[in-house]
Amino acid sequence: MCCCFKTKIVAWLEANPQYILQGMQRDVSTVVAGFIIGALVTISSIGAGAIGAMVLIMLYPRLRAVDIAGTDIAHAVPLTAVAAIGHYSLGTLDFSLLGALLLGSIPGITVGSYLSRAIPEKWLRGVLATTLTAVAAKLVM
């Protein structure tokens, strides 16, 4: 949802520069957000994408949506790998389900990577906002 309002967030921050986190304050906030997202991903398998994108927009409002998505994905990969190792060690990993997900996800990643550069920023923000809203609605139900 935050992606839809990125322009408004940036305009508000430019009108109220005292609220823009910078330097050490933003660095510490980013580390704390990473800790919270890491815990949420491990506990519930949500967070890296759904919450991570929103947090990145709030902390780095001037980044383009495609850069936020790329950064969020680059963060999610090692984060998810560590969480997966933990779940593997606990015996809570379904390998047939994992294989099926990877079979569809790997081609999807390739297509999505190319599309993210071709889709206009405004449309990409709409897609991200719709996805985040759908995830939130599903979690509530």
Image: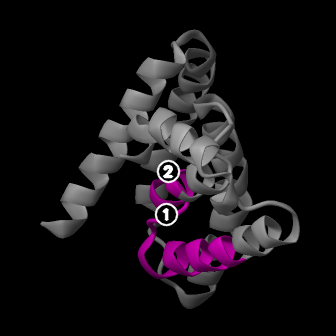
Q: Is residue 47 left or right of residue 28?
A: left
Residue 130 in sight here = yes
Q: Residues within 10 Å of mark 2 (few under 14, many from 20)?
A: few
* Magenta stretch holds residue 33: yes
The range drawn in magenta is 32-54
Q: Residue at x 68, y 52 (%)?
A: 17
Residue 104 seen anywhere in this rendered image of the structure: no
Q: Main secondary structure of the magenta part?
A: helix
Placement of 115 over or under 126, stated as above or below: above
Q: Residue at x 57, y 21 (%)?
A: 116
The residue carrying mark 1 is 95
Residue sitting at 57 percent across and 32 percent down? 109
Vertical placement of residue 23 versus 37, above or below: above
Spot occupied by residue 60 in the image (x, y as percentages of width and height): 68, 49
Quarter occupied by residue 24: bottom right
Q: Which residue is mark 2?
A: 99
Quadrant in which the C terminus is drawn: bottom left
Residue sitting at 60 percent across and 52 percent down? 16
Is 109 rendered above or below residue 78? above
Residue 90 position by quadrant: bottom right
- Position of 141 with respect to 105 (left or right) is left
Answer above or below: position of 105 versus 114: below
x and y, in percent, of residue 5 in the image: 41, 39
Quadrant position of residue 46: bottom left
Which amino acid does the dot numbered 1 rest on?
Phe
| Image location (x, y in percent) of residue 113 | 62, 25
Q: Which amino acid does the dot numbered 2 rest on?
A: Gly
